[in-house]
Amino acid sequence: MAAYGIKVGACNAGACGFRCQEVCPQGVFLAVPKERNRARHAADPHYRIVPRFAYFCDGCGECLPVCAQNAIRITSRKTGGG
Amino acid sequence: MCEFCAKHGQGNRWYLNPDNFSDEMMEDPQRVKTLEKVAGWGIEYYIDFTSRVTRLINWPVIGKAVKAMVNRMAPGEHGGQVVSLEDSMQLLEYAKDFVLLPCECRKLVGHRDDMVCLNFGPVKEIQRRFLPEGPMEEISLEEARDMVQRSDERGHFHQVLYAKVPFPICICNCDARYCTSLKQRWANNVEAAIFKGHEVCAVDTEACRFCAEPLCMSRCSFGALHYDPEAGRIHVHAGACFGCGLCRTACPRGALSLVTRESVPAAAGRW
């Protein structure tokens, strides 16, 4: 399992310009459409950020200072054994 | 030989069989349904949906059942297999109606707008129908070849996407940092998200001298090349190799080559 957990709270993606996605070296954050049943040809779907690929987080912390809402939290997970 | 080739290859690899590119393939109602689902939902919804489902594989009780279901269903839907540069060049000969679309993985994971997704066949017509004002660039066969070649030099590996096996619709020029199929395979251990290629890398231990700046290691997206301290050479971890062949072009001594997956016991039968 991944060594780090990552949480995204109150995210106003788009307003800040998806800075966390740009700086993340592992590509942890996925932009998913806000409205789930919206048809494809809707001109501008609104996205929110979810840490869908948190498995790859290596805890570098690059995303923390760039988040305008301070919405990202990184937690360390206990990895058994060792 | 992989099961797709045994079924649909007619003695060749499934994506190199010209019959699989014909318009008659669109007569299969399930294939049309799959294509319309991906285009109609929008790829952002499709990636969201599949990554939600594959995440369930890590759950304690239902995980095994979900994994079996995903691996069984994916070849009937949408997925990919890694191909080498030579195979993608040959594949382009059989295809027609090339269009460049923005890579949705790079867009949704990295917020980048790169027109690198090389689609062909029915995609042009489907894209016009579902997203008429979206970005799309029509290109010729020469431009398509040139594009694949340039991505290879830049260090992007290729995968051929199918809409229900064995109908190829796209050659991806993937970046491992953003590729959502690769992420689903690695994080959730689901093979059907992206199958490994038909070849694996082999190192000629006589020729390899382990240079000061081993470019082959930095070009490997899959972490399959290691330093072997005993021999002072590069060692290929065949179980991790996807067979993209990017490392070959970087070697100044030509020590790396691709051999068929069956000839390497550690990789044989592992797709």
Image (spheres, rainbow, N blue to C red):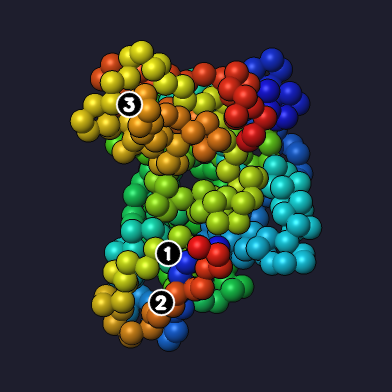
Q: Let me know if marks 3 and 1 both belong to one chain.
A: no
Residue B93 horizontal side relative to residue B62, left or right: left
Q: Chain of mark 3?
A: B
A74 over B193 or under it: above or below: below
Residue lying at 60% horizontally and 39% vertically, measured from the top left: B195
Which quadrant would the N terminus of chain B be assigned to in this image?
Answer: top right
Q: Nearer the viewer, mark 3 or mark 2?
A: 3
Could you tell me residue A60's position as x and y percent? 32, 66
Q: Which mark is residue A57?
A: 1
Q: Nearer the viewer, mark 3 or mark 1?
A: 3
Q: Nearer the viewer, residue B19 or B88?
A: B88
Mark yes or no: residue B183 visible: yes
Which residue is label 3 attached to? B232
Which quadrant would the C terminus of chain B be assigned to in this image?
Answer: top right
Which residue is label 2 attached to? A74
Q: Are dots 1 and 2 in contact, CB under 8 Å?
A: yes
Q: Chain of mark 2?
A: A
Amino acid at the residue labelled 1:
Cys
